[in-house]
Image (cartoon, coloured by chain):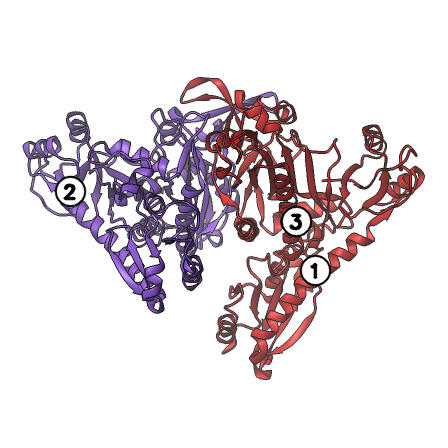
Chain colours: A purple, B red
Amino acid sequence: MADKKMVEAITSMEEDFAQWYTDVVKKAELTDYTSVKGCMVIRPAGYAIWERLRNELDKRFKETGVQNVYLPMFIPESLLQKEKDHVEGFAPEVAWVTEGGQQPLTDRLCVRPTSETLFCDYYKNTVHSYRDLPQVCNQWCSVVRWEKETRPFLRSREFLWQEGHTAHATAEEAEARTVQMLNVYADFLEEFCAIPVIKGKKTEKEKFAGAEATYTVEALMHDGKALQSGTSHNFGDGFAKAFGIQFTDQNNTLQYVHQTSWGVTTRLIGAIIMVHGDNSGLVLPPLVAPTQIMIIPIQQKKDGVLAKAAELKDMLSDFRVKLDDTDKTPGWKFSEQEMRGIPLRIEVGPKDIEAGKCVVVRRDNGEKTDVPFAELKEKVGEILAQMQKDMLERARQRRDSQTYTAKNYEEFKQIFAEKTGFVKAMWCGDRECEDKIKEDLAVTSRCMPNDQEKISDVCVCCGKPATKMVYWGKAY
Amino acid sequence: MADKKMVEAITSMEEDFAQWYTDVVKKAELTDYTSVKGCMVIRPAGYAIWERLRNELDKRFKETGVQNVYLPMFIPESLLQKEKDHVEGFAPEVAWVTEGGQQPLTDRLCVRPTSETLFCDYYKNTVHSYRDLPQVCNQWCSVVRWEKETRPFLRSREFLWQEGHTAHATAEEAEARTVQMLNVYADFLEEFCAIPVIKGKKTEKEKFAGAEATYTVEALMHDGKALQSGTSHNFGDGFAKAFGIQFTDQNNTLQYVHQTSWGVTTRLIGAIIMVHGDNSGLVLPPLVAPTQIMIIPIQQKKDGVLAKAAELKDMLSDFRVKLDDTDKTPGWKFSEQEMRGIPLRIEVGPKDIEAGKCVVVRRDNGEKTDVPFAELKEKVGEILAQMQKDMLERARQRRDSQTYTAKNYEEFKQIFAEKTGFVKAMWCGDRECEDKIKEDLAVTSRCMPNDQEKISDVCVCCGKPATKMVYWGKAY
């Protein structure tokens, strides 16, 4: 444990959660600062995580019939302005290209903050008949929003994401796709990222600019703050009317399409850090981890140790396994493996070899298991599967322990004065109450969950009859 | 064949090659125009090809130790200006962001045309000791160059590419990596895309802005024009000196790193179209094709036909196979499958079923084979493998038949007056001759090939002693 000091200490999360996050991101070598204000480098260790998330999500998308495309990164100002709510929502935070090829542009170009308008422009050209529907497209790209305060993965001027955009013949189909994709996100977060989420609908105040309805999956971080982890929007036919996207239906009648969009971003990496990390650094769920196992030889200069370590690596080639045979000390290697969140460490030294076994150490709970070489492959598979399950369960228990209920405004205020977490409370549905709560307590409505409960009969704020139960919280 | 007319005819390549290309891109639904001048939509059929190319290349990169990263899309003007040749090369064709978040920017940002300067900025922060070397990074992203004349895939204001950027301790290592990546491209183009290439070095005039040496793989299109299909640059320590990227070597001495960069773009899709396509549309090599086999039932309303077609599809699930069971006519379906370049078509109707066989039709040469159901899986594998080989061989033969040699300027001029293709001719090494050739004949030096031959003793232009054999040609 003395070797711990060799890897520069990170701030403990109890002491300063924000600093802990920054330290982990930096010391696990996930990102780096750049000379471009508000923009980050995603380093190999960070990008490898994004590749794992992207590939898994992409597979799940394609199983539902999604096709990938690529649309331009620029949006002419004239195009952006076609849908009124949308342009009002995004105009304040866009970057403008005003010169190209040493000439000023007549119609300046915004760097896409999101691509609804471009997809509308595309669908207008390609959708003519009911036979051209549905269109179920997605793109993986980067987008730009001119944020003032930035933090790696959570909020930056440029970030990576996917944006799905669909067009359907009917309102019912569009609603079904909106819900379907929210479920894809929720299942992905729980099954793959080991992050339990609340599924629900955003209030009018919090919905996406131009949407009829926004659905969200909300996760709770270690510090009790909420993170909106994925959203799915139903646009109805608002964009279709603004852009004139029409098709001839089976009765030869001209109809407007109904549209949806849905996205997740590199923020997911921030969620994984803040849900699973601990004071030794990153903890990656086995399914997410680019490297699942680090084999660390003990007294590696002794005869046969490195050879046995290499043999174990070959034995485990069905997993994502690496061998650290550098000349660092084992203690240093342990700290690095822990900092980087690699799920399992396998220690093997002369005494282990004599006994025909090695030691498998879980990153999430430190549990050590002696495993005979002959059983290693099977046992490692079992431990990784168990660890994936345990991480989800632990996250769920913590989330539940940080979820409170409030029947009236006194309770509500007291909880937020003392704690950070989700508070379930009833709401009358009026914007005024939502605004007042935000002003009084700096918390926002996270969502109206699909699973409604009745906490009381009246709005937690004004006491008028309640229409919805809402999750409230401080958010990233 | 009468059904052919049902799919709108494309211009024949003999009549108008440029129009043929445009027709194929449009009718195979690879791209679409947008409201953003000079930028394209890459549609599902086009993007699926890019995904195949990207995934294969990415796998080959990673086998050589490449790690993916993501750097910002913006470059502050002050950063771009640090390397003199580089900024001179790119400044005329960049797009400038001058306003963000409703504020004018003090240091305007260029949308990356390439990312050497950002990688230098990153390496300057992360490379300190010889232990930090080599750095072998790559990113898949889009870049912007303000082209005046644009064509889908070949030249557009925004395009997709990968850019690898490496930093090494020695000049030898940097040169070895430059050559290694050129070989990765050449092997990928030949083995995967069935496109034979000439490997060589660019002249001083044609090399990349800021490079010490640029290597290239050059392919010949159906119309005899050359397409630069991938480049690999050795920067020496020029960028390192401009950006101050230094490390402490094993003797505790401060040294500059040596750098490389290398890239291929969505242009590759243009190359595949123009090398393999024919007057019925796209022809995709089996390894590239997102869909390798289209099963087309004949008289599909007859009992058992659709069931048998579905059975064949299941039987072929190791391949990328689809079944067209829409209510279009078989002839229409044939034309669509041909237009989209799907390598194999399997026809199966009542008579085939009675005879216990189906008909397998190759897209590249129209060859039809009756195949008993029991042998289908094996046979299809064989035919696809043979087709992949034949396509490379056919492309090589055509390339060779369009490659000429010229001993003197008379021959040289005559060949280019009558033909389009590669002309191998000697060169003295002087820029004046290169400029004169370009002015006289509108052809450029494509490369000084690795495999040098001696066509004559003297420069084809000036008659002075020759130093190099050069491939000359008209280029896209």
As shown in the figure, which amino acid type bears the numbered disc 3? Answer: Asn
User: Do the residues under discs 3 and 1 have CB atoms within 8 angstroms?
Assistant: no
Position of residue B159 measured from the top left corner of the image (x, y, whole percent): 57, 38
What label sits on residue A298 in the rendered view? none
Which chain is home to disc 2? A
Per the image, label 1 sits on a secondary structure element best described as helix
**Residue A13 percent location from the top left of the image:** 23, 36
Asked if labels 2 and 3 share a chain, the reply is no
Q: Of B84 and A173, which appears nearest the observer?
A: B84
**A84 or A297: which is nearer to us?**
A297
Q: Chain of mark 3?
A: B
Identify residue type, mark 2.
Gln
Instruction: Please give the residue where the numbered disc 3 appears in the rendered image.
Output: B183
Q: Where is residue A341 shown, x and y percent of the image? A: 33, 46
Residue position marked by numbered label 2 in the rendering:
A402
Tag 1 subunit = B
Q: Is residue A166 left or right of residue B321?
A: left
Q: Earlier in the sequence, mark 3 or mark 1?
A: 3
Q: Is residue B277 above or below residue B356?
A: above
Residue A441 lies, in percent from the top left, at 16, 28
Tell me the mark number nearer the camera, choosing from 3 and 1. Answer: 3
Q: Secondary structure at mark 2?
A: loop
